[in-house]
Amino acid sequence: MEILQLMKVLSNEVNLQILSILKSGSFNPRELARILQRDETDVSRRLRMLERVGLVEGNWVRVKKKNIRIYSLKVGEVKISFEPGRIMIKTSEDRSYKISLLESKMPKVETFFGREAEINTLSSSKKPVIVIYGIAGIGKTALAARVFKDAFWYQMSEADSFDYFAWQIGLFLNTLDYPLLLEYLRGGGREERDIFELILEGLENTKAKIVIDDVHKCSDEKILKLLSFLALRIKKGRLILISREKLHFGTGENILYFQLKGLSLKDAYTLLRAKGLHLDAYDFAEIYNLTKGHPLALTLFAEAYRENQKVRTDNFFDFLFSEVYQQLSADEKLMLQIISLFDEPLEYEAIKTLYRKKNSFVILYSLLNKGIVEKRGEVYFLHDLLKGFAREVREIDEKEYYLGYLDYLLKRNTAKNFLAAFRYVIKLGDKEKIKYLIELRVKKFKRIVQDFPDAYMKTLLQIKENPYAKKELGHIYFQKGFFEKALKLWLEVRDDVDGIHRADVISFLADVYMELNNFKEAEKYLKELESIAENSDELEIKFWYYVELTKFYFYMGKPEGALRSAFEELKIVRKIGLYPEIESAVLLHIGDIHIEMEKDEEALKYYLQALNIAEAYSLAFMKNMAKMELTKMYFLLRDYERAVKYGKDAADYFIRVRNYRRATDVLSYRCLAYMALGKIDEAEKDAEEMIRIAQSTNYPLGWAGYIFLGAIKELKGESGKEYFELGKEKLRDYSWLYDAVLEELGKVFNVSKITAKS
Ligand code: ADP
């Protein structure tokens, strides 16, 4: 093992993120890339590197004549010991090491002065929630970075949204061995209440420390709601909130409000001395009076200072900035202006790309040294105070730079960068480019509508009159289950969009009409979609057509037609070869259609294929969907052992990701299968779990738990009457369900009586 190489690999945050995710199982690079919100090629490269140093292992699995690479963890831990003359690295299972994953997100304060009293107060406080507030540039960020070195740093921005925030916290908690939130989000969970509770539980269980900087920038209601929710409840974890305005979470016992003022006289003096300034007492007093110890003002003053220069005291900050600015070289000015154009901090690569000259590194570091540009992790930015001034003196053409940045972002190929790119396209106001980006969303970034609906919606609402944006808003409403709203938007823009977008609208009009049980209208759009598909070379559009057609036949009770169409879908997805998730969904549908046709053996075959694909590509949600179907299937085929086996994983998973409706479906079959096997105690546990779920969600099938419990009591030789009656009472309004439950129960009751006797 190459030690240096290994150390290098381990000191990278993204690599450590990958390792911590692999802890939960094997992964295909694509799914890992989605979870980490990173480019797939980048993730594959890292996996190969991790494999070379022996930390992970990759295996080929063969699925449908294709080879798929999946990676899993090879070692649980790495032990590093320092011995005379050498460093020993051993991988072992019995020692635990903590490597901080958080460093790279922290703001870097090269030279930090004083603040002794403040550091004392903050670090000795036992309160779980600390609010640090004070005016811009007073040193809040620098102080918090100093005191809370081991915290997870979250930088809030105007564009932040709840879904993105939750995803980041999920990734962070996962590295601390709390995978539930990330798993919930991956499984499509979107309930605000669930996410609140999972975040709270995650923070408490892991005793995590989180700093959220610039909370005043947050305009997202849900995030603010979450913060007050946490502020009132958190006990073992810690939350440090930084803001310009005082935040109000009431006067709870567990909150410390801390207002930050300027540096003390002594600290201010030390700062100026360190920056090479030797002022006499009179001059220093004047400057201290003007700056009130404001560190950013002092830094600028040190930079601007020339002997015998007259200090202007009105608009003091303005004056300081223009003095500093005038003394910059032309290159420094250019770079400063470029950075000031952007709302978010920039990576060095981006700065280099936009700045274009050879000396980018030197110039950037000179600005950093002057305290004008700042660094946090791998990104560079101007303090908000300076950004305002820099924008006023701007001489460069912002359009050109926004376009350049747009290209840069899109090459990065991740949802996050796509969303950022979208914001700049809107700034540019370029309609063609907006259309182009929306096309990219439809083709390449499909998951954005599911994974980041809030973030995408926020952006789209800025151009809500644009027909293409309306179409996209329709998708978000549809996804959230607001069918009427989606329908209205799509009908509005139907004739105003062209190309792939028109096909998109028409196919979703067919879909939404089916959801609303209006099959006549659905059929009309289906016909139109058919002719669009026939005249188009886009496989994607043909695929949409068959998806809708299958659904249509299925709803109309024509399984043969549905089956034919579903096989067309399958053919196309395999030809495109890019969407394993969709492929396994199609296979599940084919299974369902076979059930409809009472061809159980065939159904089984396709469910197993769906499982196969989902496992190969590590698609947790699809995998458990397949297992759920297999539980039912094997139950119907009276193979109770297998029903229990698949039901075990699926029920655990759906309970974990709080998808209680599906969990109950699985539990009901598993419970019956346990009864059939004579495993009464296990069956009893499942019945009780069903009742628990019904009590908190009122999902009717859950109440069947009472009926099962009654049957179980009877099997145990006790009376089940009371439970039977309770179940019947709870299912009073669902007589069809009640009958179905009794019928299924009837099937196993005979079996179990036999097993119980034998
Ligand atoms: P805020 O978060 O309140 O807006 P920052 O923490 O970003 O302010 O501080 C503004 C600038 O002053 C930054 O460049 C920071 O590095 C510098 N600064 C703040 N406090 C100190 C300090 N105690 N010593 C040295 N520099 C400081």
Image (spheres, rainbow, N blue to C red):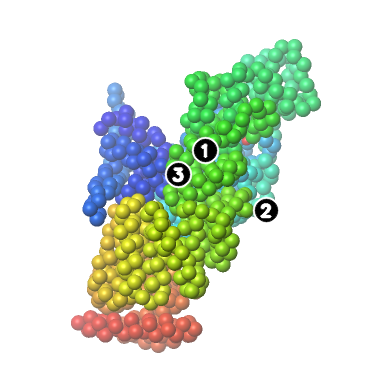
Name the amino acid, label 2.
Answer: Gly
- Please name the residue that numbered disc 3 is placed on: 414
- Work out which quarter of the rendered image holds the C terminus and state it: bottom left
Tell me how far mark 3 sits from mark 2, CA to CA: 39 Å
Image spot of residue 533 (x, y percent): 41, 59
Q: Is residue 286 left or right of residue 731?
A: right
Sequence-earlier tag: 3 or 1: 1
Nearer the observer, 133 or 377: 377
Sequence-earlier tag: 3 or 2: 2
Q: Is residue 312 above or below residue 531?
A: above
- The disc placed on residue 250 is 2
Image spot of residue 468 (x, y percent): 55, 53
Name the amino acid, label 1.
Answer: Leu
Query: Please, what secondary structure does the residue beneath circle 2 have?
Result: loop
Name the amino acid, label 3.
Answer: Thr
Q: Are marks 3 and 2 in contact (CB under 8 Å)?
A: no
Residue at the spot 63% in from the left edge and 44% down from the top edge: 217
Question: Does residue 209 appear anywhere in the picture?
Answer: no
Nearer the observer, 385 or 428: 428
- Work out which quarter of the rendered image holds the N terminus and state it: top left
Tell me how far mark 1 sits from mark 2, CA to CA: 43 Å
- Please name the residue that numbered disc 1 is placed on: 406
Ligand 1: quadrant of the figure: top right
Tell me how far mark 3 sits from mark 1, CA to CA: 13 Å
Residue at the spot 68% in from the left edge and 38% down from the top edge: 134
